[in-house]
Structure formats: C-alpha cells, structure tokens
C-alpha cells in the first residue's frame, strides 16, 4: 500500500523505548505509516497541527502537557483517532470522555495490539463506522464505575512479587519520595507510587489525607487530640501517633459532619 493510502500515524510518548516498541509493532502493518513522533505534550500539539495525522498513539503522563491536556489543546472535535497507551488503567474514564478509540496498557501485548489495529482499520477505512464505544473501553469504564467508592484490594509489586492487600486492613499510608509505604499492623510494604495517585484509588469515605505525607484509615483512628497552632494528634488504635496538619483540618470536619 502506498504511503498516501496508509493511515497517517503520530506516536507520542516521553520514553524513547516506548515509541520504539510502537514502531516495531507497526512495522509489518503496511496500511499504517508513522508520519511523526513527539517526546512531550507540547511537541505533540505542534506535530498534530503540522502533520494532521489520522491516528495518534498517546501516552498519558508526560512532562509539560499530559495526554489529556494535549486533547484539550487541540479540541475533541479536531482530534484524530486516539489510542491511549499507558501503564495505568485508572485513566480509562477520561479516555472515554475524549472519545478514544482504544486504551492499551503497557507493556503492550502483540496480540492485543493486533486487535487494536483491526479496530482502527474498521473505524478509519471500513465502509460502516463502528460504535465508538468499543468493548475494551466499556469494560474499563464499567470497572471504574463499580469502584467509584474505591477499590477493595490493591495489587502491589514488592521484591518481584505481586501482593494483594485488602484496603480495609491498611492502617495508614506515608509518602517516601516517589514511593509510598502501607502500614498494616506490624507489617509494612514499600512500593513505587505517589500518595496522591494512591489516594484516588482508596475509598474516600474511609481514607483521609491528614498531611502532605500521610493518609489514614478512619477505622484505625482511636481519637484526635488538639495540639498547638491548629494541628491535631491522630492516635491510632495501636497507640501510634500521627499529626493532622491544620491545612487538612477542614476535610476531617466535613467528614465528621457526613458521618453524624
């Protein structure tokens, strides 16, 4: 197939190996041609305007503009077909909102990628446009909607193993740089994640941010004791003492009101 008839494709990812993997997977698909690549969001916006591709494989988390900000900058109506490529499934709801064709999780499986290409062929070259609400996105959306009150279990990678932790068993969580440490009684698990990202996954009616570096399970809290300057001591049932920063006190007060 000539390049003029092939589906013009833009690859956007801040990691060069990820873009290389996409190029490799597309190598044998002669009806797709890569017209440009971008290593960050602002570069993606420029490439979209300069090359006007029909398809964009788009990472979510990038420096400068993230994937969704790229879509916002261009405008949903002016976007090409978009396939999000990310290591996290928690962005599926936002992907659905910008009418993405598909949502691929890293590391990309070749067979799964092949199904995505078939879906794109049908969407971009097929005689009848398919329903844009494809089964993969609907499945992810349904999963997210079922878990809007927070997940019941976390799957975390520790020392090469994947551990499943019930969120109800977590007493508190502390941030350690780009890692978080889960405290479950006398046990703790350290894994790579940001505290804000983990907070978004935990049940909001059970877990509360009490400072920039700590989340606490309210079921593990025994009492609050006032300290100086509006701070509070948070006493857990095991006797451990944490500090509730005055900047987060209004969250506690609102939650207490809801629980009355």
Image (cartoon, rainbow, N blue to C red):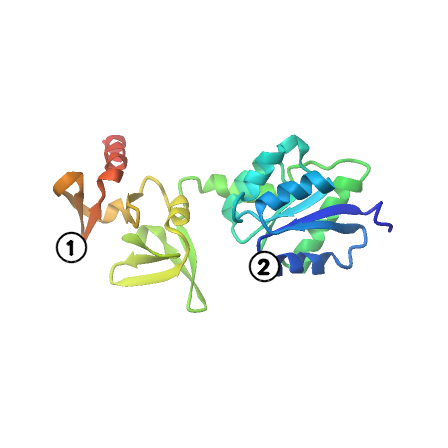
Q: Where is residue 208 in the image (x, y as percent from the top left)?
A: 30, 43
Residue at the spot 54% in from the left edge and 54% down from the top edge: 87
Q: Where is residue 195 in the image (x, y as percent from the top left)?
A: 37, 50
Separation of disc 1 and disc 2 at Cα?
A: 42 Å
Residue 29 picture quarter: bottom right
Circle nearer the viewer, 1 or 2:
2
- Give residue 20's mark: none
Tell me which numbered mark, 1 or 2, is placed earlier along the sequence. 2
Q: In this view, does 1 lie to the left or right of 72?
A: right
Question: Does residue 164 appear anywhere in the picture?
Answer: yes
Label 1 sits on residue: 239
Q: Are marks 1 and 2 in contact (CB under 8 Å)?
A: no
Identify the secondary structure beneath mark 2. Answer: loop
Q: Nearer the viewer, residue 218 or 230?
A: 230
Q: In this view, does 156 lie above or below 160?
A: above
Label 2 sits on residue: 107
Residue at the spot 64% in from the left edge and 37% down from the top edge: 133
Q: Position of residue 158 (x, y in %)?
A: 41, 65
Residue at the spot 59% in from the left edge and 35% down from the top edge: 73
Q: Which of 212 and 81 is in front in this view?
A: 212
Q: How crowded is mark 2: few (under 14 residues within 10 Å), some or many (20 or more)?
A: few
Count every numbered label the image shows and give the total. Answer: 2
Identify the secondary structure beneath mark 1. Answer: loop
């Amino acid at each position: 197939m000539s390049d003029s008839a092939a589906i013009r494709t833009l690859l956007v990812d801040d990691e060069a190996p990820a873009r290389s993997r996409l190029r490799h997977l597309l190598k044998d698909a002669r009806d797709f041609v890569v017209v440009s690549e971008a290593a960050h969001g602002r570069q993606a916006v420029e490439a979209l305007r300069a090359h006007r591709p029909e398809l964009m494989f788009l990472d979510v988390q990038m420096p400068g503009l993230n994937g969704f900000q790229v879509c916002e900058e261009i405008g949903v109506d002016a976007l090409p077909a978009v396939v999000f490529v990310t290591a996290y499934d928690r962005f599926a709801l936002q992907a659905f909102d910008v009418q993405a064709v598909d949502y691929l999780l890293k590391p990309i499986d070749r067979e799964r990628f092949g199904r995505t290409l078939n879906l794109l062929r049908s969407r971009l070259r097929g005689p009848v446009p398919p329903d844009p609400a494809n089964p993969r996105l609907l499945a992810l959306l349904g999963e997210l909607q079922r878990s809007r009150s927070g997940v019941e279990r976390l799957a975390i990678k520790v020392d090469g193993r994947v551990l499943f932790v019930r969120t109800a068993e977590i007493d508190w969580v502390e941030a350690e740089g780009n890692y978080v440490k889960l405290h479950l009684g006398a046990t703790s698990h350290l894994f790579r994640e940001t505290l804000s990202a983990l907070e978004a996954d935990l049940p909001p009616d059970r877990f509360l941010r009490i400072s920039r570096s700590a989340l606490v399970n309210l079921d593990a809290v025994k009492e609050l004791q006032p300290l100086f300057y509006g701070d509070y001591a948070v006493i857990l049932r095991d006797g451990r003492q944490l500090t509730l920063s005055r900047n987060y006190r209004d969250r506690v007060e609102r939650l207490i009101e809801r629980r009355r």
